[in-house]
Image (tube, rainbow, N blue to C red):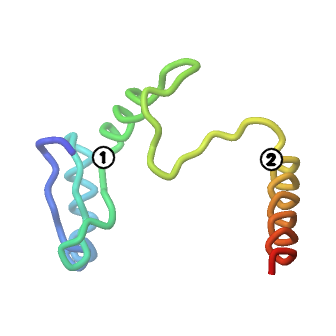
Amino acid sequence: MSRSTRKIGKSEVRKTFLGLVNQLANQSGAIEITDHGRPVAVLMGYKTYQQILQKAKVPGKPRFKLEGSMTLTGDIEQGSKEITQQFMASIDRSAADL
């Protein structure tokens, strides 16, 4: 995160949410929200969000892939059917070996 990132517990966020939103609306940066000291979310201003999106966009090829993201290519239903068939064949092979 950037230099302007600070940490705040989620209980404190509940109490000061509107103030945090107003603060982030007027400056760049982010606020890391924690639960018992463990990071669980990030609150950022729209300007910071737009900057991140712009950095992520490269025509034809992304610069980086966000964790947990995926790219769908082809027919998802056909792919699902093929995976199901492979899984069922694997179960049949395992049952035959027993």
Q: Nearer the viewer, mark 1 or mark 2?
A: 2
User: Which is more toward the observer, 39 or 16?
Assistant: 39
Does residue 49 appear left or right of residue 15 in this picture?
A: right
Q: Is residue 11 above or below residue 51?
A: below
Up/down of 52 relative to 68, above or below: above
Within-10-Å neighbours for mark 1: few <14, some 14–19, many 20+: some
Q: Is residue 48 left or right of residue 1?
A: right
Image quadrant in which the N terminus is located: top left
The dot on residue 77 is: none
| Amino acid bearing label 1 | Gly
Q: How far from the left and from the top, in percent, is residue 97? A: 81, 75
Q: Badge 2 is on which residue?
A: 76
Q: Which residue is mark 1?
A: 45
Residue 41 image-quadrant placement? bottom left
x and y percent of residue 21 in the render? 28, 56
As helix, strand or loop, the secondary structure at mark 1 comes to loop
